[in-house]
Amino acid sequence: MTSNVANLNQLFQAMNQFVSTRTSYRCLTEVNHDLKRIAPLFNARQLSAQIFSQFPLLAEGVQNYFNAHQGLRQFYSSTILDLLVSATDASNSQAPTLILKDNTVVKQSEERYRLSSSQSLLIGRDLQHQNDTRMIHIPLPMYKKVSGRHAEIQPVSSISSSVQSWQICDLNSTNGTYINGQKIKGCQVLQPGDRITLAYPTASEKAPEFTFEGQNIASTSDNPDSNQIDADFIFLVIHPTQPLSTSEKQLVDRASKAEISGLVIIADVSGTKPEDVSKITENLSSIQEWGEKNYPQLADNLDIVELPLYSFYPNTPSKPLEPAIEQRFVEFATPFIKLAKERGIELLANQISRKIQPQIQRIDQILSAAETALKNDMQRSEASLKGSSLEYWHDRYISSKKQVEESREDFFREARTVFSRHREDFSADFVPGNLLQKTEDFVNQLEPVVNKLNGQVCIQLQPQNRQDLHTTMMYFLQSELTQWGDRQWETICYSIEGQGLEGLARRAYQQLNFLPEFELANTFNPPAARLDFSSHFNTSFTEIKADISYGESSGDTFGGIARIAMLSAQAAISISASVSARQPVSPHAVMQGANAASALVGLIGVSINRPQQQKLKIEQVVDSLRRTTSNYYKNVARYLLNRVAQEVASAIESEDRRFRKARDTTDEQVRRYLMELDNISRGYKTRQELLSKDRIAFEQIQRLGG
């Protein structure tokens, strides 16, 4: 038997080494705690006895007797434990548990997490702590709205109550924690049946759901193991004439389910009278019959003895026992001492084995649960990738990103080309419908108004609406250029390459938003519906003098008219050159043109003084006045066209930058997601390798355990 204990010690050391070096497994900390309670048995070389009683005086009396008797003291270690007084068997209460509900949509099976009264439990998707025993790790891609450290389950104790509770605290998660559909703030105590969802009010393929089950538990002692049956022999000390109480029956029931060497019921007959003998006999016989009937497995291990314990009560003066009483204690102690001498090592080995074997089974179950959880996680991950590898999705994304970039380059190259062509066409004299022709046509539609007063002839160009000429011309140019700019922007947004810039953005999002179980945040916003050109028409221009006065008696000098007309043309050319070079229009050039037009009228008035020539003179003056006015506003039109075109060109460049920024933002989203999937995949491989090594090491432990 000594060899057997040595073998058990070797097994124990191997188990202890295995458990203490593998802190990543949930519940192994509990196994480690239980192994520490087994360790003293290898050095004790004593059998254990647990003493229970509703009456502390009686329990202490039995223990004092054990300590006083040399043989019992040598072979047995005794401990007094509390006897449950409650009517409910604590062993039947369900341990508080957090249950991750199954989800058939994402092929997630149910998982259970037993709560500890001394340790908090984190919930989240923190990849850096996926092997932390204090964390429920949720790596599923479909649960992407769950934060890395989303919530925490904490044990809560009350000074005024022995009841143990648990609460859940939201750790400032992005999308919140919900209990029964209601979003919580801070912490909230859990009640049995509470439904906990993360990120959404209700469970779905995007929101995991937990259920809190079990009940709050009450501790009867500072020692959580105060009522645990864990000994070779159990001693229940009772009153001899009273039937077993509920709590005493519960102890017998628990003892019947434990692996013990014997249950001894000691009836303290101290101070009983002769007339109590029959009552005591009847009561103890009734207890014997009750035990054999309800617990036949205790038939060979249940003894009921009568002992007068008063001599061993606490604070009782020590004196020799009466011979008859001493003989009764000798008869009580003799079989226990004999058993310890003959089978002590065997019983000790059996006790150690009984304690070790369940721990081996627990380790096996923990490893199996970890293997099952890993298998489920890997299956869910594979399902989320739609049966393809991560490398496939990565390569497909690179290809899609390249296509998007090529489309961007092609689109904006085409947009710039088309716009540049439209701009040239709109400013070219020889292209039908150009701005300059429209300006000239508009000037030609101006009505010449001729007035004669006191020998003076006044000729004036006037719009049909009779309003100010300059205001009317500027309104005309603004209307034409705004319409042209709007058409250019509409072409860029909706027509180039079929669907324009709006279609480019939509196609880019569709091309990049294809990864499984991942919804890309759309940063490809549609372009502005219209551009604002109003600020470009706020420039102040020198107003041209569009009327001429001359005397009817003036001489006829056509050479002077020609020279002044040439001066007017030179002024127009100067203005045109400034606008074409995209330089500010010289006020001097504008005034030169206006003064030339005025001088022209003066000469005409001098050179032509005969009545029959008046009509010809008026036509010549009006024609010259139209040309001067037309040239001036053509130059203004070129200048404003440059400004509007610059606005459109700037908007094209801005949209190109915005598109590239959206592309880069999208690329960052996808990069993080693919990196997360890669980390998950690497984590699975690491877990698989560790589990394989742990399983091999555990199989060696199983071989040691036979």
Image: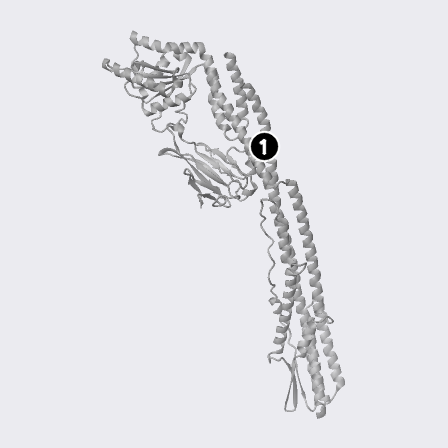
**Residue 706's quadrant in the figure?**
top right
Q: Nearer the viewer, residue 49 or 289?
A: 289
Q: Position of residue 463 (x, y in %)?
A: 62, 79
Q: Residue at x 63, y 91 (%)?
A: 454
Is the residue marked by circle 1 packed among few (<14), some (14-19), or many (20+) residues within 10 Å? some
Q: Amino acid at mark 1?
A: Arg
Q: Residue at x 51, y 14 (%)?
A: 4
Q: Is residue 116 left or right of residue 661?
A: left
Query: Which is nearer the eye, 540 or 268?
Result: 268
Q: Is residue 532 above or below residue 597?
A: above
Q: Residue furthest front?
A: 293
* Residue 435, x across and y down, in percent: 68, 71
Horizontal side of 186 relative to 573 (left or right) equals left
Seen as rendered, the residue at the extreme top is: 323
Residue furthest to the right in view is 559
Q: Residue tagged by mark 1? A: 687
Q: Secondary structure at mark 1?
A: helix
Q: Is residue 92 above or below residue 454?
A: above
> From this viewpoint, which residue is outermost toward the bottom?
611
Q: Is residue 308 visible?
A: yes
Residue 366 location in percent, x, y? Answer: 52, 29
Closer to us: 490 or 544: 490
Left or right: 435 in relation to 526: right
Observer able to see residue 82 = no
Locate residue 97, reporting x and y percent.
45, 34
When the figure is inspected, residue 110 is found, relative to residue 288, above or below; the finding is below
Relative placement, left or right, of 28 versus 68 is right
